[in-house]
Image (cartoon, grey):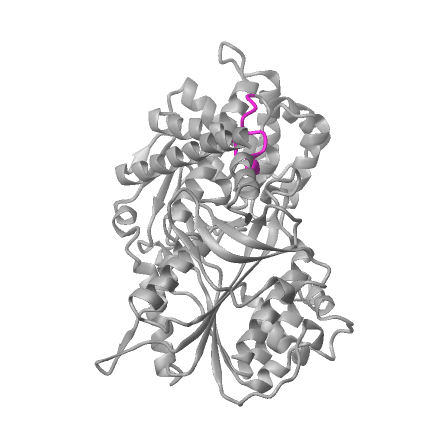
Amino acid sequence: MEQNKFRAQISRAAIEKLYISMRHLLIRGHYKPTGVSGEAMIESLLSLKPEIYGSIADPEKVELNGLLYIFQRLPIGIEQCQFIKLISREGLESSSFTPIIPAKRRRNCYRVDKKQMLIEMTRGRSDIYDVLTHLTFMFIEAEKIKYNSTDSKSKKKREWKKLEQIVKQIELGEEYNMEVGCTYLSTILGRTYNETLIACEKFAGARGVNSLFQIVYWMGRLSIDEQVSKLDREITFSSSLRNVIGHHIYGEQWADRIKNYLVEKDLFDLPIQIISANLHSVQNCLYATTAIKKKVKYNKFSELMGEVSKPNNGKLRKLINQYALKNGMHVLNDESGTNITVQIFEIDQDDFSRMAKDLGWIDFKQKKQKTLILMMDYAFGEQAYETMDELLKPIYVDGKEKSLNVKSINIMGKAGILAGEKGDIMIPDAHIFEGTADNYPFKNELNKKEFEGNGLGVYDGTMVTVLGTSLQSRDILEYFLTSSWNGSGLEMEGAHYQKAIQSASKIRKHIDKNVKLRYAYYASDNPLKTGSTLASGSLGIEGIEPTYLITSRILLGIAKQ
Protein backbone atom coordinates (compact mmCIF):
# COMPACT_ATOMS: atom_id res chain seq x y z
CA MET A 1 0.00 0.00 0.00
CA GLU A 2 2.81 2.40 0.93
CA GLN A 3 4.60 1.58 -2.31
CA ASN A 4 1.44 2.35 -4.29
CA LYS A 5 1.10 5.63 -2.42
CA PHE A 6 4.73 6.54 -3.20
CA ARG A 7 4.28 5.82 -6.92
CA ALA A 8 1.03 7.81 -6.91
CA GLN A 9 2.87 10.78 -5.39
CA ILE A 10 5.48 10.64 -8.15
CA SER A 11 2.76 10.57 -10.79
CA ARG A 12 0.87 13.38 -9.06
CA ALA A 13 4.05 15.51 -9.11
CA ALA A 14 4.44 14.82 -12.85
CA ILE A 15 0.85 15.94 -13.55
CA GLU A 16 1.36 19.10 -11.49
CA LYS A 17 4.60 19.90 -13.30
CA LEU A 18 2.94 19.35 -16.69
CA TYR A 19 -0.05 21.47 -15.65
CA ILE A 20 2.18 24.35 -14.47
CA SER A 21 4.29 24.13 -17.64
CA MET A 22 1.23 24.41 -19.86
CA ARG A 23 -0.12 27.41 -17.93
CA HIS A 24 3.28 29.10 -18.17
CA LEU A 25 3.52 28.51 -21.92
CA LEU A 26 -0.01 29.82 -22.45
CA ILE A 27 0.94 33.07 -20.69
CA ARG A 28 4.27 33.24 -22.52
CA GLY A 29 2.58 32.81 -25.91
CA HIS A 30 4.84 30.33 -27.73
CA TYR A 31 7.22 27.41 -27.40
CA LYS A 32 9.17 24.90 -29.47
CA PRO A 33 8.25 21.25 -28.88
CA THR A 34 11.87 20.15 -28.78
CA GLY A 35 13.14 23.31 -27.08
CA VAL A 36 13.73 23.65 -23.34
CA SER A 37 10.05 24.22 -22.50
CA GLY A 38 8.85 21.46 -24.81
CA GLU A 39 11.38 19.02 -23.39
CA ALA A 40 10.11 19.74 -19.88
CA MET A 41 6.58 18.75 -20.96
CA ILE A 42 7.90 15.65 -22.72
CA GLU A 43 9.84 14.64 -19.61
CA SER A 44 6.75 15.01 -17.42
CA LEU A 45 4.56 13.00 -19.79
CA LEU A 46 7.16 10.23 -20.01
CA SER A 47 7.41 10.16 -16.22
CA LEU A 48 3.64 9.96 -15.92
CA LYS A 49 3.16 7.25 -18.59
CA PRO A 50 -0.61 7.76 -19.03
CA GLU A 51 -2.54 4.56 -19.64
CA ILE A 52 -4.23 5.99 -22.72
CA TYR A 53 -0.84 6.44 -24.42
CA GLY A 54 0.22 2.83 -23.96
CA SER A 55 3.86 2.29 -24.92
CA ILE A 56 4.78 5.99 -24.78
CA ALA A 57 7.82 5.28 -22.58
CA ASP A 58 9.27 2.64 -24.95
CA PRO A 59 12.16 4.33 -26.85
CA GLU A 60 11.54 2.40 -30.11
CA LYS A 61 7.94 1.14 -30.20
CA VAL A 62 5.52 3.70 -31.63
CA GLU A 63 2.17 3.65 -29.75
CA LEU A 64 -0.46 2.95 -32.43
CA ASN A 65 -3.75 2.99 -30.51
CA GLY A 66 -2.71 6.22 -28.83
CA LEU A 67 -1.97 7.82 -32.21
CA LEU A 68 -5.39 6.86 -33.55
CA TYR A 69 -6.99 8.30 -30.42
CA ILE A 70 -5.32 11.72 -30.74
CA PHE A 71 -5.70 12.05 -34.52
CA GLN A 72 -9.47 11.52 -34.19
CA ARG A 73 -9.41 14.55 -31.87
CA LEU A 74 -7.00 16.75 -33.81
CA PRO A 75 -7.64 18.29 -37.25
CA ILE A 76 -6.82 16.15 -40.25
CA GLY A 77 -3.44 17.12 -41.71
CA ILE A 78 -1.99 18.54 -38.49
CA GLU A 79 0.90 16.07 -38.73
CA GLN A 80 2.02 17.96 -41.87
CA CYS A 81 2.16 21.38 -40.18
CA GLN A 82 5.36 22.93 -38.90
CA PHE A 83 3.46 25.75 -37.20
CA ILE A 84 0.40 25.23 -34.98
CA LYS A 85 -1.43 28.20 -33.51
CA LEU A 86 -4.15 28.09 -30.87
CA ILE A 87 -6.63 30.95 -31.24
CA SER A 88 -9.94 32.20 -29.82
CA ARG A 89 -12.96 32.93 -32.03
CA GLU A 90 -11.44 35.72 -34.12
CA GLY A 91 -13.67 36.01 -37.21
CA LEU A 92 -12.39 33.08 -39.25
CA GLU A 93 -15.83 31.47 -39.10
CA SER A 94 -17.05 34.14 -41.55
CA SER A 95 -13.99 33.95 -43.83
CA SER A 96 -13.49 31.88 -46.98
CA PHE A 97 -11.47 29.28 -45.06
CA THR A 98 -13.22 25.93 -44.81
CA PRO A 99 -13.34 24.84 -41.16
CA ILE A 100 -11.89 21.43 -40.32
CA ILE A 101 -13.79 19.73 -37.48
CA PRO A 102 -12.10 16.71 -35.86
CA ALA A 103 -14.16 13.53 -35.90
CA LYS A 104 -14.38 13.17 -32.10
CA ARG A 105 -13.88 16.68 -30.76
CA ARG A 106 -16.04 19.59 -31.90
CA ARG A 107 -13.83 22.57 -32.57
CA ASN A 108 -13.19 24.65 -35.70
CA CYS A 109 -9.69 24.37 -37.18
CA TYR A 110 -8.29 26.11 -40.24
CA ARG A 111 -5.45 25.07 -42.55
CA VAL A 112 -3.97 28.45 -43.53
CA ASP A 113 -1.29 27.04 -45.81
CA LYS A 114 0.80 23.90 -46.19
CA LYS A 115 2.78 24.64 -43.04
CA GLN A 116 0.31 26.22 -40.61
CA MET A 117 -2.79 25.01 -38.76
CA LEU A 118 -5.03 27.21 -36.60
CA ILE A 119 -7.07 25.56 -33.83
CA GLU A 120 -9.98 27.51 -32.35
CA MET A 121 -10.23 27.14 -28.57
CA THR A 122 -13.54 28.30 -27.09
CA ARG A 123 -14.17 25.68 -24.39
CA GLY A 124 -11.78 26.86 -21.70
CA ARG A 125 -8.45 25.80 -20.25
CA SER A 126 -9.28 22.09 -20.16
CA ASP A 127 -9.60 22.09 -23.95
CA ILE A 128 -6.24 23.82 -24.33
CA TYR A 129 -4.50 21.39 -21.99
CA ASP A 130 -6.13 18.50 -23.85
CA VAL A 131 -4.72 19.69 -27.18
CA LEU A 132 -1.26 20.42 -25.76
CA THR A 133 -1.10 16.96 -24.18
CA HIS A 134 -2.02 15.32 -27.49
CA LEU A 135 0.55 17.41 -29.36
CA THR A 136 3.26 16.54 -26.83
CA PHE A 137 2.49 12.85 -27.29
CA MET A 138 2.62 13.32 -31.08
CA PHE A 139 6.07 14.89 -30.85
CA ILE A 140 7.34 12.07 -28.61
CA GLU A 141 6.23 9.47 -31.16
CA ALA A 142 7.66 11.56 -34.02
CA GLU A 143 11.08 11.39 -32.41
CA LYS A 144 10.79 7.59 -32.26
CA ILE A 145 9.93 7.51 -35.97
CA LYS A 146 12.97 9.66 -36.74
CA TYR A 147 15.18 7.38 -34.62
CA ASN A 148 13.93 4.24 -36.42
CA SER A 149 14.22 5.87 -39.87
CA THR A 150 17.77 7.22 -39.76
CA ASP A 151 21.18 5.82 -38.87
CA SER A 152 23.78 7.23 -36.49
CA LYS A 153 24.90 9.72 -39.17
CA SER A 154 21.35 10.98 -39.75
CA LYS A 155 21.25 9.19 -43.11
CA LYS A 156 17.80 7.98 -44.15
CA LYS A 157 17.34 4.20 -44.12
CA ARG A 158 16.02 2.19 -47.04
CA GLU A 159 12.64 1.64 -45.30
CA TRP A 160 12.14 5.41 -45.05
CA LYS A 161 12.80 5.91 -48.75
CA LYS A 162 10.30 3.15 -49.57
CA LEU A 163 7.72 4.80 -47.29
CA GLU A 164 8.30 8.08 -49.12
CA GLN A 165 7.50 6.38 -52.44
CA ILE A 166 4.28 4.88 -51.06
CA VAL A 167 3.11 8.26 -49.72
CA LYS A 168 3.70 9.83 -53.15
CA GLN A 169 1.56 7.09 -54.70
CA ILE A 170 -1.19 7.75 -52.15
CA GLU A 171 -1.14 11.50 -52.83
CA LEU A 172 -1.34 10.87 -56.59
CA GLY A 173 -4.24 8.46 -56.11
CA GLU A 174 -2.22 5.52 -57.43
CA GLU A 175 -2.59 1.96 -56.18
CA TYR A 176 0.03 0.49 -53.88
CA ASN A 177 0.62 -2.87 -52.22
CA MET A 178 -0.39 -2.46 -48.56
CA GLU A 179 1.22 -5.71 -47.44
CA VAL A 180 4.57 -4.73 -48.94
CA GLY A 181 4.17 -1.25 -47.46
CA CYS A 182 3.49 -2.67 -44.02
CA THR A 183 6.78 -4.57 -44.06
CA TYR A 184 8.65 -1.28 -44.47
CA LEU A 185 6.37 0.56 -42.06
CA SER A 186 6.75 -2.07 -39.33
CA THR A 187 10.50 -1.36 -39.13
CA ILE A 188 9.89 2.38 -38.82
CA LEU A 189 7.25 1.82 -36.13
CA GLY A 190 9.27 -0.74 -34.19
CA ARG A 191 6.27 -3.06 -34.43
CA THR A 192 5.55 -6.49 -35.87
CA TYR A 193 4.10 -6.85 -39.34
CA ASN A 194 0.78 -8.06 -37.91
CA GLU A 195 0.49 -5.14 -35.48
CA THR A 196 1.24 -2.72 -38.31
CA LEU A 197 -1.29 -4.27 -40.67
CA ILE A 198 -4.05 -4.15 -38.03
CA ALA A 199 -3.21 -0.51 -37.27
CA CYS A 200 -3.29 0.42 -40.97
CA GLU A 201 -6.76 -1.09 -41.26
CA LYS A 202 -7.95 0.82 -38.16
CA PHE A 203 -6.70 4.13 -39.53
CA ALA A 204 -8.23 3.38 -42.94
CA GLY A 205 -11.62 2.76 -41.32
CA ALA A 206 -11.52 5.80 -39.05
CA ARG A 207 -13.35 8.97 -40.02
CA GLY A 208 -11.43 12.23 -40.36
CA VAL A 209 -7.84 10.93 -40.29
CA ASN A 210 -5.22 10.34 -42.94
CA SER A 211 -3.76 6.91 -43.62
CA LEU A 212 -1.14 5.57 -41.20
CA PHE A 213 1.42 5.72 -44.02
CA GLN A 214 0.86 9.46 -44.48
CA ILE A 215 0.77 10.21 -40.76
CA VAL A 216 3.98 8.33 -39.99
CA TYR A 217 5.75 9.86 -42.99
CA TRP A 218 4.87 13.47 -42.12
CA MET A 219 5.53 13.07 -38.41
CA GLY A 220 8.95 11.61 -39.21
CA ARG A 221 9.69 14.11 -41.96
CA LEU A 222 9.12 17.18 -39.76
CA SER A 223 11.22 15.64 -37.02
CA ILE A 224 14.03 14.84 -39.46
CA ASP A 225 13.82 18.31 -41.06
CA GLU A 226 14.15 19.92 -37.66
CA GLN A 227 17.35 17.98 -36.95
CA VAL A 228 18.95 18.15 -40.39
CA SER A 229 17.68 21.44 -41.86
CA LYS A 230 16.99 23.31 -38.59
CA LEU A 231 13.33 23.87 -39.55
CA ASP A 232 11.95 24.22 -36.04
CA ARG A 233 8.39 23.24 -35.22
CA GLU A 234 6.54 25.83 -33.14
CA ILE A 235 3.35 26.11 -31.10
CA THR A 236 1.93 29.61 -30.53
CA PHE A 237 -1.09 31.13 -28.75
CA SER A 238 -2.82 34.21 -30.13
CA SER A 239 -2.94 37.32 -27.93
CA SER A 240 -6.73 37.23 -28.16
CA LEU A 241 -6.82 33.71 -26.72
CA ARG A 242 -4.53 34.68 -23.86
CA ASN A 243 -6.70 37.71 -23.08
CA VAL A 244 -10.10 35.96 -23.04
CA ILE A 245 -9.21 32.67 -21.37
CA GLY A 246 -10.98 32.27 -18.03
CA HIS A 247 -13.26 35.29 -18.52
CA HIS A 248 -16.48 33.35 -19.32
CA ILE A 249 -17.00 35.32 -22.54
CA TYR A 250 -18.42 32.40 -24.53
CA GLY A 251 -20.35 30.95 -21.59
CA GLU A 252 -22.01 34.28 -20.87
CA GLN A 253 -23.12 34.68 -24.50
CA TRP A 254 -24.44 31.12 -24.48
CA ALA A 255 -26.39 31.51 -21.23
CA ASP A 256 -27.83 34.94 -22.09
CA ARG A 257 -29.21 33.60 -25.37
CA ILE A 258 -31.01 30.76 -23.53
CA LYS A 259 -32.53 33.05 -20.88
CA ASN A 260 -33.56 35.69 -23.41
CA TYR A 261 -35.24 32.96 -25.48
CA LEU A 262 -37.20 31.78 -22.44
CA VAL A 263 -38.35 35.36 -21.78
CA GLU A 264 -39.31 35.83 -25.44
CA LYS A 265 -41.39 32.61 -25.43
CA ASP A 266 -42.96 33.45 -22.04
CA LEU A 267 -41.40 30.34 -20.48
CA PHE A 268 -39.00 31.94 -17.99
CA ASP A 269 -41.17 31.56 -14.88
CA LEU A 270 -42.00 27.87 -15.34
CA PRO A 271 -40.32 25.26 -13.10
CA ILE A 272 -37.06 24.29 -14.81
CA GLN A 273 -35.24 20.98 -14.66
CA ILE A 274 -31.68 21.25 -16.00
CA ILE A 275 -30.12 18.14 -17.52
CA SER A 276 -26.60 17.78 -18.89
CA ALA A 277 -26.37 14.70 -21.11
CA ASN A 278 -26.10 13.64 -24.74
CA LEU A 279 -28.74 15.27 -26.92
CA HIS A 280 -30.57 12.17 -28.06
CA SER A 281 -31.32 10.61 -24.66
CA VAL A 282 -34.20 12.75 -23.33
CA GLN A 283 -35.69 13.26 -26.79
CA ASN A 284 -35.76 9.52 -27.48
CA CYS A 285 -37.11 8.58 -24.04
CA LEU A 286 -40.02 11.01 -24.33
CA TYR A 287 -40.91 10.68 -28.01
CA ALA A 288 -39.36 7.68 -29.77
CA THR A 289 -41.96 5.02 -28.92
CA THR A 290 -44.81 7.22 -30.19
CA ALA A 291 -42.99 8.67 -33.19
CA ILE A 292 -41.85 5.38 -34.76
CA LYS A 293 -43.90 2.66 -33.05
CA LYS A 294 -45.23 1.42 -36.40
CA LYS A 295 -41.84 1.53 -38.15
CA VAL A 296 -39.82 -0.95 -36.08
CA LYS A 297 -40.65 -4.24 -34.36
CA TYR A 298 -39.04 -4.56 -30.95
CA ASN A 299 -39.51 -6.15 -27.53
CA LYS A 300 -37.44 -3.82 -25.38
CA PHE A 301 -36.80 -0.08 -25.62
CA SER A 302 -33.05 -0.75 -25.82
CA GLU A 303 -33.67 -2.84 -28.97
CA LEU A 304 -35.56 0.08 -30.52
CA MET A 305 -32.67 2.43 -29.68
CA GLY A 306 -30.24 -0.08 -31.15
CA GLU A 307 -32.08 0.20 -34.46
CA VAL A 308 -32.34 3.99 -34.25
CA SER A 309 -28.60 4.36 -33.58
CA LYS A 310 -27.52 2.42 -36.67
CA PRO A 311 -25.72 4.70 -39.19
CA ASN A 312 -28.13 3.79 -42.02
CA ASN A 313 -31.26 4.65 -39.99
CA GLY A 314 -31.12 8.41 -40.37
CA LYS A 315 -34.78 8.45 -41.45
CA LEU A 316 -35.88 7.06 -38.06
CA ARG A 317 -33.88 9.70 -36.20
CA LYS A 318 -35.40 12.39 -38.42
CA LEU A 319 -38.92 11.14 -37.68
CA ILE A 320 -38.29 11.30 -33.92
CA ASN A 321 -36.81 14.78 -34.19
CA GLN A 322 -39.71 16.08 -36.30
CA TYR A 323 -42.26 14.59 -33.90
CA ALA A 324 -40.47 16.13 -30.90
CA LEU A 325 -40.38 19.59 -32.54
CA LYS A 326 -44.14 19.39 -33.06
CA ASN A 327 -44.77 18.30 -29.46
CA GLY A 328 -42.98 20.76 -27.23
CA MET A 329 -39.28 20.59 -28.08
CA HIS A 330 -37.28 23.72 -28.95
CA VAL A 331 -33.68 23.59 -30.20
CA LEU A 332 -31.08 26.31 -29.72
CA ASN A 333 -28.03 25.53 -31.82
CA ASP A 334 -24.90 27.13 -30.43
CA GLU A 335 -23.81 30.46 -31.90
CA SER A 336 -21.38 31.54 -29.17
CA GLY A 337 -18.52 29.11 -29.63
CA THR A 338 -19.19 26.85 -26.64
CA ASN A 339 -20.27 24.03 -29.00
CA ILE A 340 -23.08 23.22 -26.55
CA THR A 341 -26.46 22.80 -28.21
CA VAL A 342 -29.55 23.16 -26.01
CA GLN A 343 -32.95 21.48 -26.23
CA ILE A 344 -35.90 22.90 -24.29
CA PHE A 345 -38.88 20.61 -23.64
CA GLU A 346 -42.31 21.89 -22.55
CA ILE A 347 -43.78 18.80 -20.90
CA ASP A 348 -46.54 17.65 -18.55
CA GLN A 349 -47.75 14.33 -17.15
CA ASP A 350 -49.01 13.13 -20.55
CA ASP A 351 -45.56 13.62 -22.07
CA PHE A 352 -43.92 11.60 -19.29
CA SER A 353 -46.48 8.83 -19.78
CA ARG A 354 -45.30 8.25 -23.35
CA MET A 355 -42.12 6.67 -22.00
CA ALA A 356 -41.64 2.96 -22.59
CA LYS A 357 -42.88 0.85 -19.68
CA ASP A 358 -39.79 -1.35 -19.68
CA LEU A 359 -37.72 1.70 -18.68
CA GLY A 360 -39.27 1.35 -15.25
CA TRP A 361 -42.02 3.87 -15.84
CA ILE A 362 -45.14 3.53 -13.69
CA ASP A 363 -48.31 5.58 -13.82
CA PHE A 364 -48.98 7.69 -10.75
CA LYS A 365 -51.24 10.56 -9.86
CA GLN A 366 -49.77 14.00 -10.37
CA LYS A 367 -51.03 17.49 -11.07
CA LYS A 368 -50.86 18.31 -14.75
CA GLN A 369 -48.48 21.17 -14.17
CA LYS A 370 -46.27 22.06 -17.10
CA THR A 371 -42.52 22.01 -16.48
CA LEU A 372 -39.49 22.77 -18.63
CA ILE A 373 -36.56 20.48 -19.20
CA LEU A 374 -33.48 22.42 -20.27
CA MET A 375 -31.24 19.82 -21.89
CA MET A 376 -27.65 20.90 -22.51
CA ASP A 377 -25.10 18.86 -24.41
CA TYR A 378 -21.90 17.76 -22.66
CA ALA A 379 -19.55 20.47 -21.45
CA PHE A 380 -15.79 19.86 -21.50
CA GLY A 381 -13.76 20.03 -18.28
CA GLU A 382 -13.61 23.52 -16.73
CA GLN A 383 -16.19 24.65 -19.29
CA ALA A 384 -18.78 22.98 -17.03
CA TYR A 385 -18.19 25.65 -14.38
CA GLU A 386 -18.31 28.49 -16.90
CA THR A 387 -21.59 27.41 -18.52
CA MET A 388 -23.43 26.38 -15.33
CA ASP A 389 -22.26 29.46 -13.42
CA GLU A 390 -23.52 31.77 -16.17
CA LEU A 391 -26.76 29.84 -16.68
CA LEU A 392 -27.74 30.10 -12.99
CA LYS A 393 -27.12 33.85 -12.78
CA PRO A 394 -30.17 36.16 -12.73
CA ILE A 395 -31.20 38.18 -15.76
CA TYR A 396 -32.70 41.66 -15.90
CA VAL A 397 -36.20 41.78 -17.39
CA ASP A 398 -37.84 45.23 -17.68
CA GLY A 399 -35.30 46.58 -15.22
CA LYS A 400 -35.99 43.89 -12.61
CA GLU A 401 -33.67 41.07 -11.60
CA LYS A 402 -35.19 37.62 -12.20
CA SER A 403 -33.74 34.19 -11.50
CA LEU A 404 -34.61 30.90 -13.16
CA ASN A 405 -37.05 28.76 -11.19
CA VAL A 406 -34.64 25.81 -11.04
CA LYS A 407 -36.10 22.73 -9.34
CA SER A 408 -33.42 20.17 -10.16
CA ILE A 409 -30.03 19.80 -11.82
CA ASN A 410 -29.29 16.41 -13.34
CA ILE A 411 -25.94 15.28 -14.72
CA MET A 412 -25.50 12.14 -16.79
CA GLY A 413 -21.98 11.65 -18.04
CA LYS A 414 -19.50 9.20 -19.47
CA ALA A 415 -16.68 8.30 -17.10
CA GLY A 416 -13.80 5.94 -16.60
CA ILE A 417 -14.63 3.24 -14.06
CA LEU A 418 -12.07 1.87 -11.60
CA ALA A 419 -13.70 -1.32 -10.30
CA GLY A 420 -16.11 -2.48 -13.01
CA GLU A 421 -16.44 -2.92 -16.75
CA LYS A 422 -17.42 -0.82 -19.77
CA GLY A 423 -21.14 -0.08 -19.66
CA ASP A 424 -21.46 -0.29 -15.87
CA ILE A 425 -23.01 2.55 -13.84
CA MET A 426 -21.54 4.82 -11.13
CA ILE A 427 -23.67 6.75 -8.59
CA PRO A 428 -21.49 9.33 -6.79
CA ASP A 429 -22.00 10.95 -3.39
CA ALA A 430 -19.07 13.36 -3.74
CA HIS A 431 -16.71 14.86 -6.29
CA ILE A 432 -13.07 15.48 -5.48
CA PHE A 433 -10.97 17.67 -7.72
CA GLU A 434 -7.67 15.90 -8.31
CA GLY A 435 -4.58 17.75 -7.11
CA THR A 436 -6.50 20.36 -5.10
CA ALA A 437 -8.23 20.65 -1.73
CA ASP A 438 -11.60 21.12 -3.48
CA ASN A 439 -14.03 18.43 -2.33
CA TYR A 440 -17.78 18.55 -2.99
CA PRO A 441 -19.99 16.12 -1.03
CA PHE A 442 -23.69 16.33 -1.90
CA LYS A 443 -27.02 14.52 -1.49
CA ASN A 444 -27.68 12.52 -4.64
CA GLU A 445 -31.38 11.93 -5.28
CA LEU A 446 -30.41 8.84 -7.28
CA ASN A 447 -29.29 5.74 -5.43
CA LYS A 448 -27.69 2.41 -6.21
CA LYS A 449 -30.85 0.34 -5.65
CA GLU A 450 -32.69 2.09 -8.50
CA PHE A 451 -30.25 0.60 -11.01
CA GLU A 452 -29.76 -2.91 -9.68
CA GLY A 453 -31.35 -5.93 -11.33
CA ASN A 454 -30.82 -4.70 -14.89
CA GLY A 455 -27.80 -6.85 -15.75
CA LEU A 456 -25.33 -3.99 -15.27
CA GLY A 457 -22.75 -3.49 -12.54
CA VAL A 458 -23.62 -0.57 -10.26
CA TYR A 459 -21.05 1.17 -8.04
CA ASP A 460 -21.31 4.07 -5.63
CA GLY A 461 -18.66 6.19 -3.93
CA THR A 462 -16.50 9.14 -4.83
CA MET A 463 -15.94 10.44 -8.36
CA VAL A 464 -12.55 11.97 -9.11
CA THR A 465 -12.65 15.03 -11.37
CA VAL A 466 -9.37 14.98 -13.28
CA LEU A 467 -7.45 17.63 -15.23
CA GLY A 468 -7.61 15.48 -18.34
CA THR A 469 -8.32 11.87 -19.25
CA SER A 470 -5.04 11.83 -21.17
CA LEU A 471 -3.03 12.47 -18.01
CA GLN A 472 -4.07 9.56 -15.83
CA SER A 473 -1.56 6.99 -14.65
CA ARG A 474 -2.29 3.55 -13.23
CA ASP A 475 -0.54 4.44 -9.96
CA ILE A 476 -2.82 7.39 -9.18
CA LEU A 477 -5.98 5.55 -10.16
CA GLU A 478 -5.14 2.47 -8.10
CA TYR A 479 -4.49 4.72 -5.10
CA PHE A 480 -7.92 6.37 -5.43
CA LEU A 481 -9.53 2.92 -5.76
CA THR A 482 -7.83 1.18 -2.83
CA SER A 483 -7.43 4.04 -0.36
CA SER A 484 -10.06 5.58 1.94
CA TRP A 485 -11.04 7.93 -0.89
CA ASN A 486 -13.23 5.04 -2.14
CA GLY A 487 -12.97 6.22 -5.74
CA SER A 488 -15.45 4.58 -8.11
CA GLY A 489 -14.54 6.46 -11.29
CA LEU A 490 -12.99 9.47 -12.95
CA GLU A 491 -14.40 12.19 -15.20
CA MET A 492 -13.70 15.83 -16.04
CA GLU A 493 -16.76 17.94 -15.19
CA GLY A 494 -18.37 16.89 -11.87
CA ALA A 495 -16.42 19.11 -9.46
CA HIS A 496 -16.75 22.06 -11.85
CA TYR A 497 -20.54 21.65 -11.99
CA GLN A 498 -20.68 21.33 -8.20
CA LYS A 499 -18.55 24.45 -7.72
CA ALA A 500 -21.06 26.46 -9.79
CA ILE A 501 -24.15 24.87 -8.21
CA GLN A 502 -23.03 25.23 -4.59
CA SER A 503 -21.93 28.80 -5.24
CA ALA A 504 -25.29 29.68 -6.83
CA SER A 505 -27.44 27.93 -4.21
CA LYS A 506 -25.59 28.34 -0.92
CA ILE A 507 -23.55 31.54 -1.33
CA ARG A 508 -24.91 33.80 -4.05
CA LYS A 509 -28.56 32.77 -3.56
CA HIS A 510 -29.28 32.68 -7.30
CA ILE A 511 -31.31 29.46 -6.97
CA ASP A 512 -33.08 27.60 -4.18
CA LYS A 513 -30.68 26.11 -1.65
CA ASN A 514 -32.70 22.87 -1.69
CA VAL A 515 -32.48 22.29 -5.43
CA LYS A 516 -32.53 18.54 -6.17
CA LEU A 517 -29.30 17.04 -7.54
CA ARG A 518 -29.06 13.83 -9.53
CA TYR A 519 -25.74 12.49 -10.79
CA ALA A 520 -25.07 9.22 -12.60
CA TYR A 521 -22.32 8.07 -14.95
CA TYR A 522 -21.91 5.14 -17.29
CA ALA A 523 -18.50 3.63 -17.91
CA SER A 524 -17.01 4.44 -21.30
CA ASP A 525 -13.72 2.78 -20.35
CA ASN A 526 -11.70 1.21 -17.58
CA PRO A 527 -8.25 2.86 -17.57
CA LEU A 528 -6.91 0.18 -15.20
CA LYS A 529 -7.73 -2.66 -17.56
CA THR A 530 -5.53 -3.38 -20.58
CA GLY A 531 -7.55 -3.12 -23.79
CA SER A 532 -10.35 -1.14 -22.12
CA THR A 533 -8.93 2.39 -22.15
CA LEU A 534 -10.44 5.14 -24.29
CA ALA A 535 -7.77 4.44 -26.90
CA SER A 536 -9.31 1.00 -27.47
CA GLY A 537 -12.37 2.56 -29.10
CA SER A 538 -15.80 3.93 -28.26
CA LEU A 539 -18.39 2.17 -26.13
CA GLY A 540 -20.67 1.63 -29.14
CA ILE A 541 -23.88 -0.35 -28.74
CA GLU A 542 -22.90 -1.30 -25.15
CA GLY A 543 -23.70 2.27 -24.18
CA ILE A 544 -27.39 2.10 -25.13
CA GLU A 545 -28.61 0.19 -22.06
CA PRO A 546 -26.94 2.38 -19.39
CA THR A 547 -27.67 5.64 -21.25
CA TYR A 548 -31.41 5.12 -21.33
CA LEU A 549 -31.58 3.48 -17.92
CA ILE A 550 -30.00 6.56 -16.35
CA THR A 551 -32.09 8.97 -18.44
CA SER A 552 -35.33 7.22 -17.48
CA ARG A 553 -34.45 7.37 -13.76
CA ILE A 554 -33.73 11.08 -14.05
CA LEU A 555 -37.02 11.72 -15.85
CA LEU A 556 -38.96 9.61 -13.34
CA GLY A 557 -37.43 11.62 -10.50
CA ILE A 558 -38.39 14.87 -12.22
CA ALA A 559 -41.97 13.69 -12.81
CA LYS A 560 -42.39 12.80 -9.12
CA GLN A 561 -41.20 16.17 -7.83
Q: In screen coordinates, is 340 left or right of 254?
A: right
Quarter location, residue 93: bottom left
The residue nearer to you, when weighing 183 against 331, is: 331
> Where 94 sits versus 135, above or below?
below
- The count of marks equals 0
Q: In this view, does 2 lie above or below 161?
A: below
| Front-lying residue, 310 or 277 | 277
* 370 magenta-colored: no
User: Residue 188 occupies which quadrant of the picture?
Assistant: top right
Left or right: where 548 falls relative to 253: right
65 relative position to 272: left or right: right
Q: In this rendered view, identify the residue nearer to me: 120 or 136.
A: 136
Q: Residue at x 35, y 29 (%)?
A: 32
Residue 51 colored magenta? yes
Find residue 386 and report its horizontal and vertical position in percent: 35, 59
Q: In this view, does 183 lie above or below 265?
A: above
Q: Position of residue 549 (x, y in %)?
A: 64, 66
Q: Main secondary structure of the magenta part?
A: loop
Query: Residue 282 location in percent, x, y?
Result: 57, 71
Residue 151 sits in quarter: top right
| Location of residue 185 with respect to 297 vertically, above or below | above
Q: Residue at x 58, y 29 (%)?
A: 55
Residue 177 seen in this snapshot? no
Quarter of the image with the N terminus in it? top right
Q: Do we see residue 263 in this rendering?
A: yes
The magenta span reads 49-59
Q: Which of 229 and 495 is in front in this view?
A: 495
Q: Where does residue 344 sit, x and y in percent of width and height? A: 47, 75
